[in-house]
Image: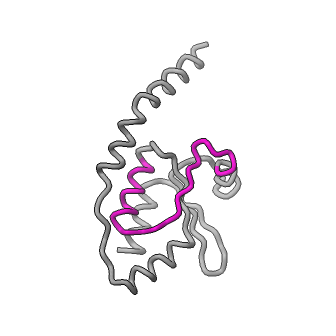
Amino acid sequence: MIRTMVRMFFRTLRWILMPFMLLWAKLATPKGLVRSADEQHKTDLECERMVLYHFQTCPFCIKVRHEMARLSLPIKLLNAQHDPLRREELQQGGGKIQTPCLRITDDQGNVQWMYESNDIIKYLQHRFS
């Protein structure tokens, strides 16, 4: 009984806060880094091997998406919040259903699953700054 009430409380809280989180995500998105056409093309090709699994209103996911925008990275986004297929991919590939999660595929086809927003941001900054 208590457990159900706690779940309902947090679901209601998320429902109330969701519009504010989405507004913040939109208004706080930074301007993108400007690169030469050749450099941006090279960056675009590297980003084709990356996918970010995220929840639309997760503050940690928003933080990562803002950094992607700041670095002008066209990384594919997959919303895993209500998509059972995406949630299963996260569970099977990375071992847990947690977002944000960056899936990185190298030149040999090896896949790395990176969790934790700060780790993802450091990786992107190191690779693309």
Residue 71: percent from the left, percent from the top?
36, 68
Quarter of the image where the C terminus is located: bottom left
Residue at the outermost top position:
1
Q: Is residue 62 magenta?
A: yes
**Is 79 placed above or below 107 here?**
above
Quarter of the image where the N terminus is located: top right
**Is 83 placed above or below 68 here?**
above
- The residue drawn where x is 51% and y is 79% is 45
Residue at the outermost bottom position:
38
Quarter of the image where one finds residue 65? bottom left
Question: Is residue 109 found left or right of 70 in the rendered image?
Answer: right
- The residue drawn where x is 31% and y is 71% is 33
Q: Nearer the viewer, residue 116 or 51?
A: 51
Quarter of the image where one finds residue 83? top right
Quarter of the image where one finds residue 64? bottom left
- The residue drawn where x is 52% and y is 51% is 54
- The residue drawn where x is 46% and y is 29% is 15
Q: Is residue 78 magenta?
A: yes
**Is 25 placed above or below 70 here?**
above
Q: Is the image coloured rainbow, by chain, by secondary structure, or in one colour?
A: one colour
Residue 99: percent from the left, percent from the top?
53, 49
Residue 58: percent from the left, percent from the top?
45, 43
- Specify the segment rendered in magenta: 60-86
Residue 92: percent from the left, percent from the top?
71, 54
